Image: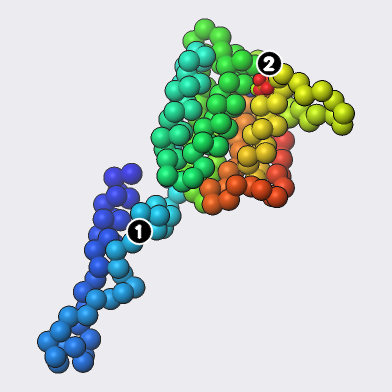
């Protein structure tokens, strides 16, 4: 973060150059290609930013993880969707895996990029995370919709790991779109 800020800082000042003609006239010319950038340009022209954070497996840490993600993605326009994805995956970790047992933990990984990677790693011990698709004509169920919601907000989702070593459930969220009309590419790999 520091090095990024340091290197970016230099680029924010417009470069003042002197062309031959203007030098003769003793005038300074502002190089328009190096003008001050907007906040959006500043955010997007940098390399992806990546964070990892470990949370204890207490239920209240779901809210903490959600808030953490929402804070980091503020201003992208998808912060609410990213927060939902994190909340669903973190809830699953504490509810369906050993992460929710005494001294349990789950890990959150976030990469802020045009296609942002969001992943929660748990301690396994339960079943395999499975998207539950409603059957035609089926009454809307009270539960079993979390991973389906995640898959609708993402352009791709996947799972790796196993009940023995724990699972990582991930989602790729496109920040510049709302995924409307895009097809989710789901990948499941269990080792
Ligand atoms: N991290 C996980 N570890 C083990 N099993 C999981 C995990 N996440 C999901 N599952 C399994 O996949 C199923 C579907 O998960 P999903 O989040 O869609 O529904 P749910 O958690 O049962 O209910 P809801 O999210 O709607 O409250 C779960 O019922 C559970 O059996
Ligand atoms: Mg769930």
Question: Looking at the image, which residue is at 68% across and 16% down?
Answer: 126
Q: Give the SS element for disc 1.
A: loop
Ligand 1 has an atom within 8 Å of the beta carbon of the residue at disc 2: yes
Residue 128 x %, y %: 71, 23
Residue 115 appears in the picture as rendered: no
Quadrant of the rendered structure where residue 12 is? Answer: bottom left
* Mark 2: few/some/many CA within 10 Å (<14, 14-19, 20+): some
* Residue beneath the point at 54% across and 52% down: 176
Q: Which residue is mark 2?
A: 126
In the image, ligand 1 is in what quadrant?
Answer: top right
Residue named by callout 1: 38
Q: How is the image coloured?
A: rainbow
Q: Is residue 43 above or below residue 36?
A: above
* Res. 116 in view: yes
Query: On screen, 78 above or below 37?
Result: above
Q: Which image quadrant: the C terminus?
A: top right
């Amino acid at each position: 973060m520091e090095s990024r800020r340091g290197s970016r800082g230099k680029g924010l000042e417009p470069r003042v150059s002197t062309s031959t003609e203007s030098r003769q006239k003793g005038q300074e010319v502002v190089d328009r290609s190096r003008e001050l950038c907007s906040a959006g340009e500043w955010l997007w022209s940098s390399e992806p930013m990546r964070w990892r954070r470990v949370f204890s497996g207490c239920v209240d840490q779901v809210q903490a993880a959600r808030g953490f993600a929402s804070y980091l993605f503020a201003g992208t326009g998808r912060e609410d969707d990213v927060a939902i994805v994190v909340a669903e995956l973190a809830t699953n970790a504490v509810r369906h895996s050993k992460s929710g047992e005494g001294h349990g933990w789950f890990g959150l990984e976030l990469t802020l990029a045009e296609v942002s990677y969001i992943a929660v790693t748990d301690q396994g011990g339960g079943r395999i995370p499975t998207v539950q698709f409603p059957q035609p004509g089926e009454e809307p169920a009270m539960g079993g919709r979390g991973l389906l919601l995640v898959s609708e907000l993402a352009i791709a989702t996947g799972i790796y790991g196993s009940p023995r070593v724990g699972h990582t459930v991930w989602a790729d969220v496109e920040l510049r779109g709302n995924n409307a009309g895009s097809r989710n590419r789901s990948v499941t790999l269990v080792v």
